[in-house]
Amino acid sequence: MSNEGSSKKQQLLADAALLLCTIIWGATFIMVDKAVDTIGTYAFNAFRFSIASVVLLLLFGYRFFKKGLTSSEIWKGIVTGFFFFGGYTFQTLGMQFGTSAGKAAFITGLSVVLVPIISAILDKQVPSIYAWLGILVAVVGLGLLSIESGFAFQLSDLLVLACAFCFAGHIIAIDKFIKEVHFSSLATFQSITTAVLAWISTFIFWPQSFPLVFNQQVIFALLFTGILATALILVLQTTAQKKTPSLHVAVIFSMEPVFGAFFAFIFGQELFHWRQWLGCGLILISMLWQQLLDIVIKPKLATKREPHNKIDMTRDDKELISEKANDNNNHDNKKIIEK
C-alpha cells in the first residue's frame, strides 16, 4: 500500500473514532439531564472529570513515572484543560441566565465555523470553497435541528458564544499540541485541570450544590460519563487529531446534537418534526461531504492539474535539448570551417 493510501486509511479510522465520540456524547444527554436534577450541574461536572482523571492516571501513571514528564507536556495539558472547562462552564452559565437549550445547542455548534476561521488566521491557510460549502450545510442543519421558535438575541447568548469559542480553541489546541507531546499527557492533564477548576468554581460560586445527594441513577451517570464520555473520549480525540485535520473534527462533532436527538427519540423523550429530521440529514450530508472532498474531489482536481504540468515540463525539456543541440551543431560547424 502506498504512503498516500495508508495516510487516507489512517484518516478514515481517525474520523471513525471521532464519530464514536459523538455517539457516546449523544447517549449521555438523557442520563445527565436527569442526574443534574439531583446533584446539580457544577458538582456533577466536578465529579465527572475527577473520575476521568483517576482513570487516566491509572492507565498512564506508570508511563509518566517511568519516562518522566516535561514542563511542556504539563502546561500544554493545562492550556487545553482551560479551553475544555471554559466550554462546559460558559454553556451552563448561558442556559442558567436565559438561553434556551435549543438555541444553546445551535450557538455551541457554531464552533464548526469558528475552527476554520481561527485556523486560517493562525496558519494563514484558508479552506477551499468546497469546504465552506460543507460548513454552511452543517450550520443550516444545526439551525433546523435546534431552533424551534424565533432567534431573539439575549445577553446570555454571549456566554454560549464564548462556549463555542472555547470548544473551537480546544480542538485547535489539541491539533497544535498533539504534534509535540504524547497523547497520554495531553489527555490526562487537561482532565485534571478541568476537574480542579470545576471543584474551585463549585465551592466558590455554587456552594448551594452542597450537601450532595446521590442515588443509583446519579452514580451510574457519573461512572458512564467519567469513564466513557470523558476519559475514553479524551484518549480517542487526542490520538485521532494526530491523523485528521481540525476541520474534520469540527464537522464530525457537529453530529453530537444529532445523536442526542436520536437517542431522545428512541427512548421516547422527544418527538421529531420534519424540521429536525431535515436538520439531522443536512448535518450528516455535511460530514459525508468532507469525506468525499478529501477522498474523491481533491485527488481529481490534483489529477487534472498534473497532466498540464507534465506537458509544460516536457515542452521545456524539449526546448532546452533543442537549444543544446543547436549549440553543439554550431560548435561542430565552426570546427569544420576552421579546419
Image: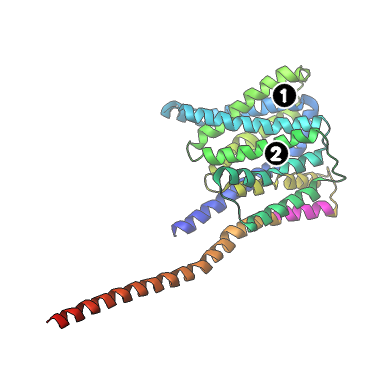
CA gap, disc 2 to disc 1?
22 Å
Looking at numbered disc 2 in the image, what kind of residue is underneath it?
Ala
Asked whether 316 falls inside the magenta stretch, the response is: no
Q: Which disc, if any, is residue 43?
A: 1
Question: Crowding at label 1, few (<14), some or many (≥20) Cα neighbours within 10 Å?
Answer: many
Q: Which disc, if any, is residue 105?
A: none
Looking at numbered disc 1 in the image, what kind of residue is underneath it?
Ala
Q: Position of residue 251 (x, y in %)?
A: 66, 49
Residue numbers of the magenta segment:
275-284
Tell me which residue sits at (66%, 54%) in the image: 132
SS for callout 2: helix
Q: Is residue 14 left or right of residue 25?
A: left
Q: Position of residue 324 (x, y in %)?
A: 28, 73
Q: Nearer the viewer, residue 8 or 47?
A: 8
**Disc 2: which residue:** 164
Answer yes or no: is residue 167 visible: yes
Q: Is residue 147 left or right of residue 85?
A: right
Question: Crowding at label 2, few (<14), some or many (≥20) Cα neighbours within 10 Å?
Answer: many
